[in-house]
Amino acid sequence: MERQIKRARDMIARATTVAAFSGAGISAESGIATFRDSETHALWKRFDPLKLASPEGFIEDPETVIDWYNWRREQLSEVSPNGGHLAFARYPDLVQITQNVDDLLERAGVNSDHIYHLHGTITKDRCHSRCGYEETVDLATAPGLRHCPHCNAFMRPALVWFGEPLPEAVWHKAEVLCSRINCLLVVGTSASVYPAAGLIEIAKSSGAHIIIINTQSSGVSDLADVEIIGRSGELLPLLLEGLSLSSY
Ligand code: OAD
């Protein structure tokens, strides 16, 4: 492990441009369940993504879907950023590409302009029919199923469900960045959901070094120049201590 950390630190120190790409694992030590994991409490082991994370599931039973997201929102309101989020927050010029819909990077102090939320955010609701109306919600007391005050369609969390496109501008920025950086830190993701996971391949094929931190090997382990197996809340502070990191 120490050897892997040293190799990764040397790679980061040599890189002129670095970016981070994270998934649910970075928030696990804060107490937020991952989706796919060896852990039994992983969300997609307990709940059906087609019922809770698809437009079809929402049309079929909107109340259940909203209640489920409000349950997750309440949990999020009760937790705090962990050592991984805080380690990243020390680098204001490091872009954070994340699949996470939580706001723990923001709460750790990362500049929100530098966080690319590929899958949207759970901190807002938007109109399901895309009339353009959206509202920030209070995580602890988010409202139940309701209608858009502009067009009367249902309101829903402003995140991306299976079968829906990623926010175009965010995706474009992430794709461009991954094709020009020297090093990508891939943290806490199973890298099984596309197109997001494809960013790792874009970075690799553009010549970037890939450093992976995960508690287990993942579908992209073979792309790693260095893979460090362990918890990101503990490893990121050790990995980044004293280095300078920028995406520009
Ligand atoms: P997953 O739940 O698929 O993967 C989480 C990864 O984190 C797993 O590979 C774990 O081994 C790893 N992990 C767990 N605890 C960790 C820790 N403390 N430190 C480091 N790694 C740890 O999450 P994602 O890859 O983010 O979509 O999933 C991708 C998308 O699938 C999510 O964005 C979500 C889901 O459906 C939406 O919410 C729209």
Image (cartoon, rainbow, N blue to C red):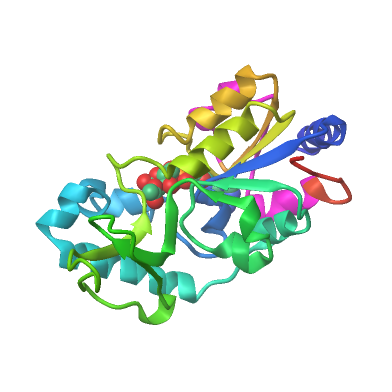
Is 64 positioned to the left or the right of 223 in the image?
left
Residue appearing at x 57%, y 29% in the figure:
200
State which region is magenta: 216-239
Exactly how many numbered labels are in the figure?
0
Question: Would you place residue 98 above or below residue 150 in this image?
Answer: above
Q: Residue furthest right?
A: 242
Residue appearing at x 61%, y 64% in the figure:
106
The front one of 116 and 79 is 116
Residue appearing at x 33%, y 59% in the figure:
132
Res. 38 visible in picture:
no
Q: Would you identify the image quadrant in which residue 128 lies?
A: bottom left
Image quarter in which the C terminus is found: top right
Is 211 positioned to the left or the right of 155 in the image?
right
Question: Would you place residue 166 above or below residue 87 in this image?
Answer: above
Question: Would you place residue 153 above or below residue 213 in this image?
Answer: below
Q: Is residue 235 magenta?
A: yes
**Residue 169 position within the rendered picture, expressed as x and y whole percent measured from the top left:** 49, 42
**Residue 179 position within the rendered picture, expressed as x and y whole percent measured from the top left:** 63, 26
Q: Residue furthest left?
A: 60
Question: Would you place residue 130 above or below residue 204 in this image?
Answer: below
**Residue 171 position within the rendered picture, expressed as x and y whole percent measured from the top left:** 50, 39
Q: Would you identify the image quadrant in which residue 157 lies?
A: bottom left
